[in-house]
Image (tube, rainbow, N blue to C red):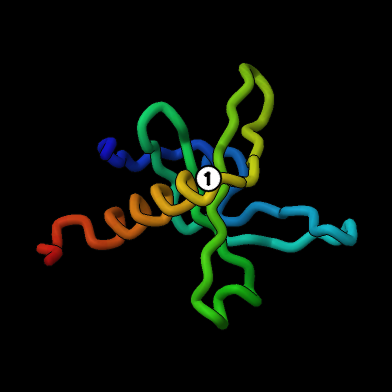
């Protein structure tokens, strides 16, 4: 497995929250929980107010295109999503001994 490294791409641009547009066209604020690099890709763990109640986290790929603001892309492949979720857990328990 690739090494996980903390990064800061979204927070310098958006602050602690980013607004995402839902399927119905409504915007909803998501708190930026973590940004990290796994292999050669950047990812973000985000959480809306409603997700916080159920302790759920949404993971997105961060795309950087030159001078443009970073964009978020959904992770469709289950295998990639699982790897990203595991990397996020590794960041949470950084320095802790895990069984």
Assign the C terminus to one quadrant of the image.
bottom left
Quarter of the image for residue 95 reads bottom left
- Check disc 1: other Cα within 10 Å, few if <14, some if 14-19, many if 20+: some
User: Taking 66 as reference, is 23 left or right?
Assistant: right
Q: How many circles with numbers are drawn on the protein?
A: 1
Quarter of the image for residue 96 reads bottom left
Assign the N terminus to one quadrant of the image.
top left
Q: Residue at x 34, y 50 (%)?
A: 87
Q: Name the residue under label 1.
A: 11
Residue at the extreme right of the image, as rendered: 24
Q: Which residue is drawn at 60% across and 73% down?
A: 51
Front-lying residue, 15 or 60: 60
- Compared to residue 78, the image places residue 62 above or below, namely above
- Compared to residue 13, the image places residue 44 above or below, namely below
Residue at the extreme top of the image, as rendered: 66
Q: What element carries label 1?
A: helix
User: Taking 94 as reference, is 53 left or right?
Assistant: right
- Compared to residue 71, the image places residue 17 above or below, namely below
Q: Position of residue 44 (x, y in %)?
A: 50, 48
User: Taking 60 as reference, is 36 left or right?
Assistant: left
Front-lying residue, 35 or 67: 35
Q: Position of residue 53 (x, y in %)?
A: 56, 82
Q: Which residue is drawn at 55% across and 40% down?
A: 61
Q: Position of residue 56 (x, y in %)?
A: 53, 71
Quarter of the image for residue 10 reads top right
Q: Residue at x 66, y 36 (%)?
A: 71
């Amino acid at each position: 497995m690739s090494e996980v490294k903390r990064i800061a791409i979204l927070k310098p641009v958006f602050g602690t929250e980013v607004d995402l547009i839902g399927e119905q066209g409504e915007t909803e604020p998501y708190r930026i929980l973590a940004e990290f690099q796994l292999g050669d890709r950047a990812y973000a763990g985000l959480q809306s107010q409603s997700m916080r109640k159920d302790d759920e986290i949404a993971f997105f790929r961060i795309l950087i295109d030159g001078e443009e603001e970073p964009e978020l892309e959904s992770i469709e492949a289950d295998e990639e999503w699982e790897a990203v979720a595991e990397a996020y857990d590794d960041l949470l328990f950084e320095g802790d001994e895990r069984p």
